[in-house]
């Protein structure tokens, strides 16, 4: 299957490449960089939303699924992108955001009228009253952006549900008309040439009941809408009626998903999704989703990866996306020990490219881009960061602490413009960029790495070539061997082929335990440091060995 033997490259369009110098990345900009994507070795692009949107959540609030955000271009540009990508044998998958629309979508505007046939496209309910007669929302749920989930509409005297921002009203999947609308959207983009969809928060679309949720410190009410039977039924219907008629695949973004639920969502025989993005591995050193740090342990990472690698038919392998901090700042050395930034970026590339599944590389990951060096709240754009800040203010959390947590966790860390070269605005735009550019762009940029065989970019390319040539690295069984706080060793095995991988997630030289040293004596396929390994692994080094 083409999507199994391939690499996906995620583009966050507003930060990739600006073509008309308005400071915002756009579709012609993407077209001008297709050769770079091809050169990396990626054959699939996942495009974060490019649809018409008021941008309350940077495009994840869609006001027209059949049109393009004018900031990014026109439908003709999008068609050209499909055509130019096809010439290079690159498929494009679209971001399918169907849990909610924008409040500026025509459906929602009409649904504000209680008599409209569109009323039931969304979830409208009357409020409650407390003992003293004060108005209360229909239930106690708390949303993904830390705030209220019900917005009162004085025109009809009812509330509508929004699990994200109030400008993102949730659709009602108990209404078959909504499912029919989604089928139309899928067909429209598949007919235009899309190779599939990344499905936004796809395991929470069906709300079984609107009863109060159990008390929780973060999202509250989940048990009424996470991975419900009704949700599975919707996915099966979309697959049967539309997706299975095309040569395409889906990857679901599945929030708070556990292993058993994930299995149900992407078990091939159930015909729902093809694979899912889970979050466990990125949360091994975080509490309360990703907000509060805790100690990194390679052993924990190996344990979590093993569980997922061994249990699912197929994994979506990602370490970064537009919601997550940069991986060199997270698991790598960028914040702890800058001199190993590049080395750690390469070691992480080795980790990702030697796992079982389809790797997703997020723009900038391949050159080792780091978290943004923000210095103040005014430099942030992300709606989640501002909601979190407001919430923490309400609880009187001091500014330095609020800043510390937001700086590390803000989604803007991954959203700063792509660093193409060492020139004006890193070659992203000649205008004024919509979000600040990381000041390290003179050291970390595409053009300085392009022809340097020692660069992070060259290492990604080498790892991708190695992976594509090896059935074992793509499909082989995943076998954990050893791990402690810093060191991780695992194998991949298929039909008598065996590879061993050893990775050092620390700035110390680590000793390979005697018992396993022999495994690393095989033929070295590639190593990060290019040094021969006896009993020791250099700081942040990685080694891939063929054992037979
Ligand atoms: O980033 C998160 C937590 O801090 C997640 O909860 C995130 O909101 C969740 O993974 C859902 O993300 C997706 O849907 C959101 C959108 O804001 C994100 O950009 C998108 O990836 C709502 O559409
Ligand atoms: Ca532009």
Image: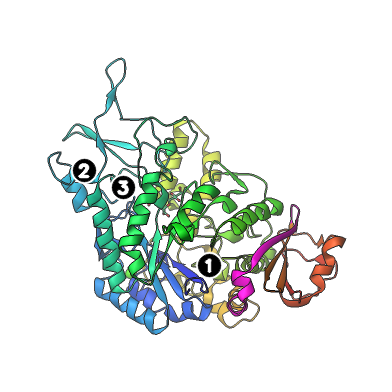
Q: Secondary structure at mark 3?
A: loop
Q: Badge 2, how many Cα within 10 Å: few under 14, some, many 20+?
A: many
Residue interval drawn in magenta: 465-486
- The residues tagged by marks 3 and 2 sit, at their Cα atoms, a distance apart of 16 Å
* Vertical side of 323 occupied by 45: above or below: below
Does the closest atom of ligand 1 sit within 8 Å of the Cβ of label 3?
yes
Q: Residue furthest left?
A: 115
Residue at position x 54%, y 44% from top? 291
Q: Residue 219: x, y in percent? A: 45, 38
Q: Residue 232: x, y in percent? A: 39, 50
Does the closest atom of ligand 1 sit within 8 Å of the Cβ of label 1?
no
The circle drawn on residue 168 is 3
Q: Earlier in the sequence, mark 1 or mark 2?
A: 2
Q: Which of labels 3 and 2 is toward the front?
A: 2
Does residue 401 appear in the picture of this structure? Answer: yes
Q: Badge 3, how many Cα within 10 Å: few under 14, some, many 20+?
A: many
Asked if the residues shown at circle 1 and circle 2 are in contact, with their CB atoms under 8 angstroms apart, the answer is: no
The circle drawn on residue 120 is 2
Residue at position x 62%, y 48% from top? 285
Please identify the quarter of the rendering in which residue 191 is found: bottom left
- The residues tagged by marks 1 and 2 sit, at their Cα atoms, a distance apart of 38 Å
Q: Secondary structure at mark 2?
A: helix
Residue at position x 28%, y 45% from top? 172
Q: Residue furthest top?
A: 132
User: Taking 430 as reference, is 346 left or right?
Assistant: right
The circle drawn on residue 358 is 1
């Amino acid at each position: 299957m083409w999507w199994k033997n391939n690499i996906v490259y995620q583009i966050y369009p507003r930060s990739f490449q600006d073509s008309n110098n308005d400071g915002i990345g756009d579709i012609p900009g993407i077209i001008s960089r297709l050769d770079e994507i091809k050169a990396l070795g990626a054959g699939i692009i996942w495009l974060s939303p490019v649809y018409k949107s008021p941008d309350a959540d940077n495009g994840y609030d869609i006001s027209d699924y059949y049109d393009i955000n004018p900031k990014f271009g026109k439908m003709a540009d999008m068609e050209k992108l499909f055509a130019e990508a096809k010439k290079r044998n690159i498929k494009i998958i679209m971001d399918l955001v169907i849990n909610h629309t924008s409040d500026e979508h025509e459906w929602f505007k009409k649904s504000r009228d209680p008599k409209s046939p569109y009323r039931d496209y969304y979830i409208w309910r009357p409020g409650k009253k407390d003992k003293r007669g004060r108005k209360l929302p229909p239930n106690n749920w708390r949303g993904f952006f830390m705030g209220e989930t019900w917005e009162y509409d004085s025109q009809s005297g009812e509330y509508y549900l929004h699990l994200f921002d109030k400008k993102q009203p949730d659709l009602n999947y108990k209404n078959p008309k909504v499912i029919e609308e989604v089928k139309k959207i899928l067909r429209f983009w598949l007919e235009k040439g899309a190779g599939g969809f990344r499905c936004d928060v796809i395991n929470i679309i069906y709300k079984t009941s609107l009863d109060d949720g159990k008390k929780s410190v973060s999202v509250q009410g989940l048990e009424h809408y996470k991975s419900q039977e009704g949700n599975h039924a919707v996915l099966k219907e979309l697959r049967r009626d539309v997706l299975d008629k095309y040569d395409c695949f889906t990857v679901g973004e599945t929030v708070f998903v556990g292993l058993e639920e994930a299995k149900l969502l992407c078990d091939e025989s159930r015909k729902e999704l093809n694979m899912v993005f889970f979050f466990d591995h990125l949360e091994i050193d975080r509490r309360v989703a990703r907000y509060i740090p805790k100690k990194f342990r390679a052993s924990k990472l190996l344990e979590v990866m093993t569980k997922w690698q061994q249990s699912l038919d197929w994994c979506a392998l990602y370490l970064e996306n537009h919601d997550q901090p940069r991986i060199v700042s997270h698991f790598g050395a960028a914040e702890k020990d800058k001199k190993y930034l590049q080395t750690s970026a390469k070691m992480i590339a080795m980790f990702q490219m030697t796992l079982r599944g389809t790797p997703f590389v997020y723009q900038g990951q391949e050159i080792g881009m780091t978290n943004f060096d923000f210095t103040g709240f005014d430099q942030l754009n992300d709606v989640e960061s501002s909601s979190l800040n407001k919430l923490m203010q309400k609880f009187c959390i001091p500014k330095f602490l609020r800043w510390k947590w937001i700086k590390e966790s803000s989604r803007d860390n991954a959203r700063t413009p792509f660093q193409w070269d060492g020139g004006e605005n890193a070659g992203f735009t000649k205008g004024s960029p919509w979000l600040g550019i990381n000041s390290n762009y003179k050291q970390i940029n595409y053009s300085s790495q392009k022809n340097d065989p020692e660069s992070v970019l060259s290492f990604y390319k080498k790892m991708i070539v190695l992976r594509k040539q090896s059935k074992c690295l793509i499909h082989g069984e995943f076998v954990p061997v050893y791990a402690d706080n810093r060191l991780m060793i695992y194998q991949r095995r298929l039909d008598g082929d065996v590879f061993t991988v050893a990775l050092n997630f620390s700035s110390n030289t680590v000793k390979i335990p005697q018992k396993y040293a022999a495994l690393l004596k095989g033929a070295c396929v590639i190593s990060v440091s290019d040094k021969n390994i006896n009993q020791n692994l250099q700081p942040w080094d990685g080694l891939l060995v063929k054992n037979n």
